[in-house]
């Protein structure tokens, strides 16, 4: 479809469907916990979609800290490490499950 528009898009970059608004890498999830639209070209709700943050092996320390803060847990180095280990074992999980894991460390 993009070929017809003569658009140069990396074939690994999703531009349609659910993959456009599913984010897992550490830097993405860390930033998106603060500002959900930062990596999206449009609000998924404008097209009947929704945003999906996924946490797991790729989750970084910054996102783990933010998850702990949202779960009202102090983000000590020990808790960050424990949460990252649990996310690695359980992931990929959605935001609610990640917050539940954060609450338990």
Image (tube, rainbow, N blue to C red):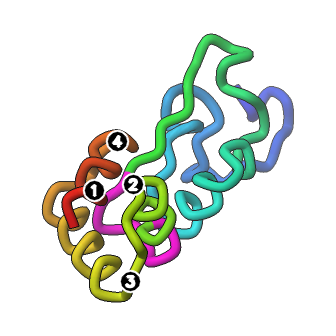
Counting every numbered tag in the picture gives: 4
For the residues labelled 3 and 4, say whether their Cβ atoms are less than 8 Å apart. Answer: no
**Element on which disc 3 rests:** loop
Foreground residue among 33 and 15: 33
Residue at horizontal 40 percent and vertical 67 percent from the top: 59
Cα distance between the residues tagged 1 and 2 = 5 Å
Instruction: Point out which mark residue 94 bears.
Output: 4
Residue at horizontal 41 percent and vertical 68 percent from the top: 64
Cα distance between the residues tagged 3 and 4 = 22 Å
Cα distance between the residues tagged 4 and 2 = 14 Å
Q: Which residue is identified by label 2?
A: 71
Mark toward the start of the polypeptide (2 vs 3):
2
| Residue 78 percent coordinates (x, y) | 28, 86
Q: Give the range drawn in magenta.
A: 55-63
Question: Label 2: few (<14), some or many (≥20) within 10 Å?
Answer: some
For the residues labelled 1 and 2, say whether their Cβ atoms are less than 8 Å apart. Answer: yes
């Amino acid at each position: 479809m993009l070929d017809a528009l003569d658009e140069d898009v990396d074939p690994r970059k999703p531009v349609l469907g659910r993959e456009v608004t599913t984010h897992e890498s550490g830097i993405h999830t860390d930033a998106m916990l603060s500002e959900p639209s930062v990596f999206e070209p449009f609000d998924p709700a404008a097209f009947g979609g929704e945003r999906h943050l996924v946490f797991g092996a790729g989750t970084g320390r910054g996102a783990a800290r933010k998850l702990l803060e949202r779960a009202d847990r102090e983000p000590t180095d020990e808790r960050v490490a424990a949460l990252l280990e649990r996310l690695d074992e359980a992931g990929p999980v959605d935001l609610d499950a990640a917050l539940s894991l954060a609450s338990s460390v």
